[in-house]
Image (cartoon, rainbow, N blue to C red):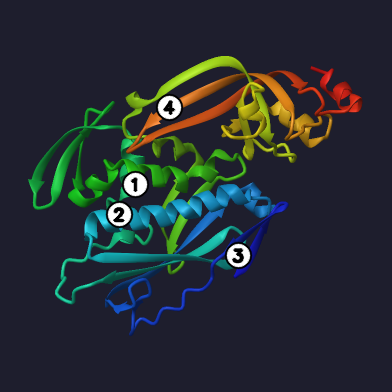
Amino acid sequence: MSKEKYGHETLILNTNFNISLGNLVDVMNNEKWSKSDFVEFTVKFNGEAVESNEMDAEELATSLMGISAILEESNTILNGQYSKMLVKVRSSFRPGSFIVDIATFFTSDGITAIVNIGSLIGFIGGASTLIWLFRHTKGEKILAKKQVQGNNYEVTVKNSNSTTIINGDVLGLYENASVREALRKVTYPLNNKGISDITFLKNGKECEKISRDEREYFTLLDKESIDTKEDIDTFLITQSNFEGKQTGWRVSFGNSALSDKKLNDFPVKIVDEDFLQKVKEQKIIISNEGTIIKARYKKTTQKLERLNVSWEILEILKIDHMPGKHTDKLKRFFSIF
């Protein structure tokens, strides 16, 4: 195991990828699988946050898990039930740089048409890749598609008068909700102003790059399926980020007994920068056992293959506390609101 430190957080990465290419074994079933494919590529995060060694560990972990998820999901979709993919990530010992190892197994030696997943996505090069298609169409919905030759399709996307010729396998991944959700996770660090781009390289050569300005392209396929609600309500803080970061917070509604016992809390992202700065500077004291906030929030409901709900606290309007949970000293901190 190796540890990469970003700011005050430590990320533990699995560096054990000890699979012999001449004798690939399915450790789950203890059966020998036929060797099919083994590739390696590098993912590099660039920007001021990386240069200053302050890249957020949660953002990094989310992106790396997204890379693993899109590879495994794409393999299942295109190579079928008789294949298995193992994805391992290890540090390259350069700031913000990680090596991704991919091994694909097949149960039958008779399988001849093996789809190179890494190439289709764009991690190891290739023309008209999935990442290229997202950038080219700005992530818009496919309105029409027509098979033109072999496994190629002519597609028309929303908000565009031109057509694009694209491989059918890439098109299938583009329209898959789980794949798109995985790509959203891959690009998650780009929400941080300190990350300028995510670059994928093979043997030191750049294959694909996603810039911060392009992050919005890698979202939901059907943007009309998003339901957004803004309102004001009262929340009980059940988990805090005392470093004043947007993520790492959990809340529940009101101050009920259920809320007090943390039986119905959920994660939120707090974007009130004034509040976060005061938390970081300890000008506001927060307790995980009784701090109540009145806040303006946004609730976003997205329908992928399952219902997904995300919460943002837009503005903290008032801070209070539950009786018996704080001392008089803490009350003086709350009086500033």
Q: Is 314 left, or right, of 119 in this rendering?
A: right
Q: Residue placed at 53% from the left, 63% from the top?
A: 98
Q: Where is mark 3, residue-wise?
A: 94
CA gap between label 3 and label 2 equals: 29 Å
Q: CA distance from mark 1 to mark 4?
A: 18 Å
User: Which of the 4 image quarters holds residue 294?
Assistant: top right
Q: Looking at the rendering, which quadrant does residue 138 occupy?
A: top left
- Dot label at residue 301: 4
Which amino acid type is marked by label 1? Answer: Val
Amino acid type at circle 4 is Thr
Q: Nearer the viewer, mark 4 or mark 2?
A: 4
Q: In this rendering, which labeled residue sits more in front, label 3 or label 1? A: 1
Q: SS class of the residue under badge 4? A: strand
Q: Which is more N-terminal, label 3 or label 4?
A: 3
Alpha-carbon distance for marks 4 and 3?
A: 38 Å
Amino acid under disc 2: Ser
Single out the mark in the foreground, 1 or 4: 4
The CA span between labels 4 and 2 is: 25 Å
| Residue designated by label 1 | 179
In terms of sequence position, does the residue under pointer 1 or pointer 2 come before the other? 2
Asked whether the residues under the numbered discs 3 and 1 touch, taking CB atoms below 8 Å apart as contact, a structural biologist would say: no
